[in-house]
Amino acid sequence: MGEFVGGLADLARLEIAYEIEDQFGVRFTDADVSAWRTVGDLHRSILARSAAAGNSCEDWARLQRLLSESYGVPAEWVVAEAELFGEPLRLDKRGSPRWPAPAPGSPTQR
């Protein structure tokens, strides 16, 4: 993935992209990353870039848990149609994510 410069949403996209690349073993293009508007867009990018034919449901659950725990948003907000940088998620306004996500019930969890 190359570099591009923009606002807070672009910075948040890059942070998410790097962590998803690391956690899922995929690589995104700048076009992939700049096209993300919803959680569903991100999930489709993971599936499209995955070298192994993974389980879509398992990948979804991992993505949902990663975004929820890392950004401190309720898991029920992390749905396919939720905007990454719009209400209710506003991942670009939540401050630095906690990568990797803390284990459920850990003292560092919000």
Image (spheres, rainbow, N blue to C red):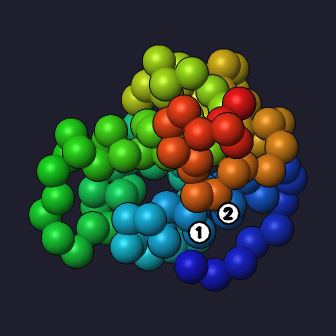
- Helix, strand or loop at disc 1? helix
Q: Is residue 69 above or below residue 2?
A: above
Mark carried by residue 14: 2
Mark 1 nearby-residue class (10 Å; few <14, some 14–19, many ≥20): some
Number of labels in the image equals 2
Q: Say if residue 80 shows up in the picture.
A: yes
Where, by quadrant of the figure, is residue 86 drawn? top right
- Relative to 63, is 96 on the left or the right? right
Residue 7: % across, % down: 86, 53
- Relative to 8, is 54 on the left or the right? left
- Relative to 51, is 102 on the left or the right? right
What residue is drawn where x is 72% and y is 49%? 97
Q: Is residue 79 above or below residue 44?
A: above
Mark 2 nearby-residue class (10 Å; few <14, some 14–19, many ≥20): many
Residue 37: % across, % down: 57, 40
Mark carried by residue 18: 1
Q: Say if residue 9 shows up in the picture.
A: no
What residue is drawn where x is 47% and y is 18%? 76
> From mark 1 to mark 2, how far is it between C-alphas?
6 Å
The C terminus lies in quadrant: top right
- Are discs 1 and 2 less than 8 Å apart at CB? yes
- Relative to 44, is 6 on the left or the right? right
What residue is drawn where x is 32% and y is 41%? 60
Disc 1 residue type (three-letter): Tyr
- Helix, strand or loop at disc 2? helix
The N terminus lies in quadrant: bottom right
Residue 79: % across, % down: 43, 25
Where, by quadrant of the figure, is residue 46 drawn? bottom left
Pick the front one: 41 or 22:
22
Where, by quadrant of the figure, is residue 87 drawn? top right
Pick the front one: 69 or 77:
69
Residue 39: % across, % down: 48, 37
